[in-house]
Image (tube, coloured by chain):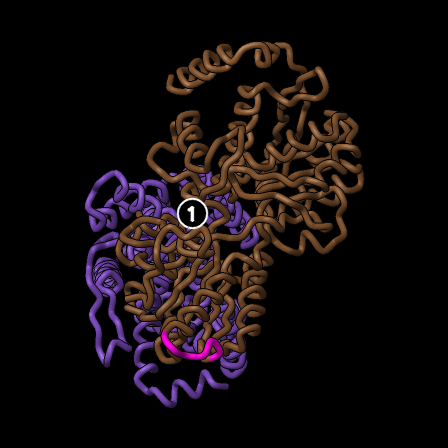
Amino acid sequence: MSNIGLLIDFPIVNLKIIIDGVMIGALFALAAYGLALVWGVMNVKNLAQGDFVIAGGYIAWYLANMGLPPLLGIPIAFIVMWGIGWLTYKLVIKRVIERDLFTSLLATFGLAIMFAQLMNLMFGSDTQSIQLDYDTLDFADGLINLPMAQLLGMTMALAMAFGVILFMKRSRMGQAIRATAQDARAARVLGIDTDKVYSFTFSLNAAICGAAGAIIVMAWVIQPFYGITYSVRAFVIVTAAGLGNLPGVIAAGLGIGALEQYGSHIFGIGYQQAIAVLLLILVLFIRLLQQRRNRQVLQ
Amino acid sequence: MKTLKTLGAALVATMTVGAGSALAAECETITLGSAISLTGKYATNGVHAKNGYEFAIQKIDENGGIKMGDKCYNFSVIYYDDESKGDRGATLAERLINQDGVQYMLGPYSSGLTKAIAPVTEQYGIPMVEAEGASRSLFNKGYKYLFAVLSTSEQYLASAVTLAAEKAQESGKEASSVKVAIAVENDPFSLDIRAGVKEDAEKYGMKIVLDEKLPRDLSDMSAILTKVKLIRPDVLVVSGHSKGAATAVRQIGEQKVKVPMIAVTHCEAADVVGNFGDFANDILCSTQWAETLTYEDPIFGSAANYEKEFKEAFPEYTNKTVPYQVAQASAAVYVFKDAFERANSLDKDAVRDAIAETELATFYGNIKFSENGNNIAKPMVLRQIQDGKYNVVAPSEFASHKLNWPRN
């Protein structure tokens, strides 16, 4: 394995791989965080998660092409996707929320296909991106590069994650969301309008995804059918971290980013997605072993 | 409005030519059929191809149509949208042949769709001239009725290897000292490109130092670029459609990857100059055709004239270069015209035999088919992005500019 040899001969490359991984991992974490929210609060596993991300990207890209400053695309994508999320909730999610798992899986799967095809019709199938005129910082004889666009994206992703955590802890709505997640029935008894909580949660999730997409289009590229990539990562991360464990989601997001980069360095970039899925299987297996050890009473 | 004006001008022009074209109004119609991607993931290029077909039909009409004996004909095409799906394409081909009674077909867009439709046209013995399917796997099945005007895909970037060998020798080194890095997507088209590059590299005894497959949903290739920095190859070849071109050019620029020669496919589709500006400088891009080439023919004039008149007819292309997908579609229609006139018959087998014997100089390049139906008379062209412009640098007999080497 000459690829491993390179890692040993040039130890600094390890640092570069981790940095590259953490950069993209921060965005995986954002999408995963939204998924954890919806999953935990509403028990809906949203398969259209990645398509929300890409939709946010296209909103930012469209605005940048209209001549707006690219960075403004992030808050606007957040707001527009909030609206789209709210509409999706009212039209589809609301009707499947009380149903069994498969109904909601099928519904969100349908949404994912619809979103991807709509974007294809509206924006065409070519890859798109926004180029920011920022420089790249170099370290270690140019072996480590930090493109400012990616650095900016990661900072904003982390800032937003922090903001959402704060919101969940401090605000009334955040408390209501957490109460609903713990026990929807009890929350309703105590006067919390759970329907409002649900619609708020789903809109917030779409908005977070949208902002993540707006960052992605500035640092990487998007295409109408790229949603699935982000959906898969989000599922792996949430499964690994568990619901209701926000720092865990962020750590798992950064971790999976780094592991993927390592994997694609050693086995080849063609296996990048395979590595993500392999990790999912591994996580599920470990979880299974853990649960064997502490058996619980059936609820 | 502009289209109308040019049409009017053309009409006046043909009227003044006199008797020969006065017949144009009484020409009969030859109906061609085509399943083409007007929606779905290939829609952009599908529409390019359709515009190319339509423009050629219009030009042939203006030039007096297809002359067979004392009769004359004009083409008209029945189009169906294949939605960029192979099974749909095959169904539509059956429909064109069985229900619409089409006897001659123009190709769809992409190798995949051509692969789906070719068995159908073959089964019914319908000659198909295609312009948008380059995979060489189309031409080893022994198809008798399939003809392609474009160069097959293994030739797309192979000339970059030759160019690297020339440069190495110029600077006093052995061609075999050149180190080649390959990063291609795992699809038939890109794997052909890889095979072509590897074959040529082996011919010179070059070493392949990196050989990676890009994923279908590529958006980050920093893992490969890090290796490129460590291994320091002399040539880097990237093929992954427009996402490959966009990702490669952007990240090569961002990560300041220095390789003396970088060759990429689909630069125009990804609009790397418009999107990434200076990052795209000195990158080599392969193309089937360029408007600066010195080819010409009596219908379309020179390559430059083709571009000019096409833009007049389709004003939506005014501010961009006309993609080669358009030009080769026009060339396919021209092949049919030439074959009908030589066959002097509407019989599909006679037309097929006439196509097989085509030896035609066109604005798009020379066209002569091998036994397998691919065009062996036209080379691929390499252009280098120099100060934001695409300049032809290889093969040397068509080169309008000198190669900038080494890159930065």
Above or below for B297 versus A103: above
Chain in purple in the render: A
Q: Position of residue B56 (x, y in %)?
A: 54, 29
Residue type at the position of mark 1? Ala
Q: Residue A295, how many percent across, how many down?
A: 52, 79
Reading the image, the residue beneath label 1 is B269
Residue B151 lies, with reference to residue A90, above or below; the image says below
Residue B339 against residue B388 in the figure, above or below: above
Count of marks placed on residues: 1
Whether residue A189 is visible to the viewer of this picture, yes or no, is: no
Viewer-nearest residue: A18 or B104: B104
In the figure, B401 relative to B222: above or below?
above
The C terminus of chain B sits in image quarter: bottom left
- Horizontally, residue B49 falls left or right of residue B244, namely right
Residue in the foreground of this view, choosing between B402 and B208: B402
Where does the N terminus of chain B fall, quadrant-wise? top left
Which residues lie in the magenta part?
B171-176
Disc 1: CA contacts within 10 A as few (<14), some (14-19) or many (>=20): some
Q: Secondary structure at mark 1?
A: helix
Q: Name the tint of chain B in the rendering.
A: brown
Q: Is residue B175 inside the magenta stretch?
A: yes
Q: Is residue B105 visible?
A: yes
Residue A263 at x, y = what percent? Answer: 45, 76
Magenta includes B25? no
| Residue B333 on image: x %, y % | 60, 32
Q: Which secondary structure class fits the magenta region best? A: loop
Residue shown at 39% from the left, 30% from the top = B316
Residue found 56% across the figure and 49% down from its top: B378
Residue drawn at x 33%, y 35% is B319
